[in-house]
Amino acid sequence: MRTIKCLFLLLIFNSTQTVIAQIINTIPAKATNSESFFLYEVKLVDEFIERFNDDPMSYIRQQCKSLYGTDSMITRRMLLKTLINKTQSWNGDTAQFFQQVTNVAHPQYLSFTDSNWYAEAKCIFLYNKQKVEIPVVLHIKTVNKASKWMIAGIGSSEIFKDKPALPSLRIDIVTSSGDFIPTSSHGTNFVVFNYAFSDKMRPADYFEKELLATSKAQYFIQLVKQHKITFQYVKNIRYHFFQLESWIFTVEQFKRKEANKGWLISSLQKVSPEEQETILWKLLYPVK
């Protein structure tokens, strides 16, 4: 295969300026440009977590070993910097974030099975023959080493502003049928919602107890069971991570023809424990 220069993008931070993207390393490659872009692309949020943690079995390390015979040119700090969306401006907090995460004495990592990260799925439903958007927020729940996605929040939507009266419907929010949302469902844009959001739905299978206690969740379930709204598809997903001390960040998908693409950090915020709790509450239980 024709030898070319494979460009490894690295974000360099200046303490007095916004973040800029620079190419700081070139290595001989045995791949075309499109193959190189595919190598560096963060294709799934699972891969994002692997790269964030610098998992020795991560896709990018395994491919580097396959292509170049070594992955010794890769460091965790380098990988972390490739997980930032380079088209945005970033302040000095970002460098501080990397320093904290890669601290030799107390490095910090993400965990897929940790409950303290959330998938915000912008769902499209049909309501009165019109498309409406309802954000559904999920997190991972692990019990006895078995994990699944559970709905932990419902976002703001126009259908909740002026709630029309519905025929009374007794909803069993306790009994479970054993159905669940598999942990792989985010990779298919939660197509399982086609089955979950039906008149046969057992809410206890899919909704957290705290959410089921809210009037918004009960109203949403009534709409589904009475065929007032019909799930169509998930428009997009973004992920909110609350796992790291003093920080929260959001990951979104960026589609473009360059190496810095895929699931990347789109926002990063340094917060106090009180601020973190407030932001999470607004995500799970917005006013409308």
Image (spheres, rainbow, N blue to C red):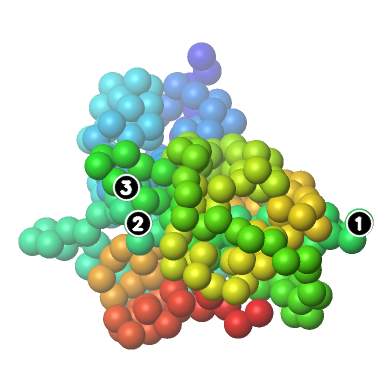
Residue 98 location, quadrant? bottom left
First reached walking from the N terminus: tag 1 or tag 2: 2
Quarter that holds the C terminus: bottom right
Q: Which mark is residue 142?
A: 3
Pointer 1: what residue?
129
The three-letter code of the residue at mark 1 reads Lys
Regarding mark 1 in the picture, which secondary structure is present there? Answer: loop
* Residue underneath mark 2: 115
- Tell me the residue at 74%/49% (across/down): 231
- Relative to 246, 227 lies left or right: right
Q: Image height check: is 146 above or below 35?
A: below
Which amino acid does the dot numbered 2 rest on? Ser
Determine crowd level at label 2: few under 14, some 14-19, many 20+ residues with C-alpha closer than 10 A.
some
Q: Say which label, 3 or 2, has the lower sequence index.
A: 2
* Label ID, residue 229: none
Check disc 1: other Cα within 10 Å, few if <14, some if 14-19, many if 20+.
few
> How far from the left and from the top, in percent, is residue 232?
76, 47
Counting residues from the N terminus, which is met first, the one under dot 3 or under dot 1? 1
Q: Residue at x 50, y 70 (%)?
A: 213
Q: Residue at x 60, y 74 (%)?
A: 215
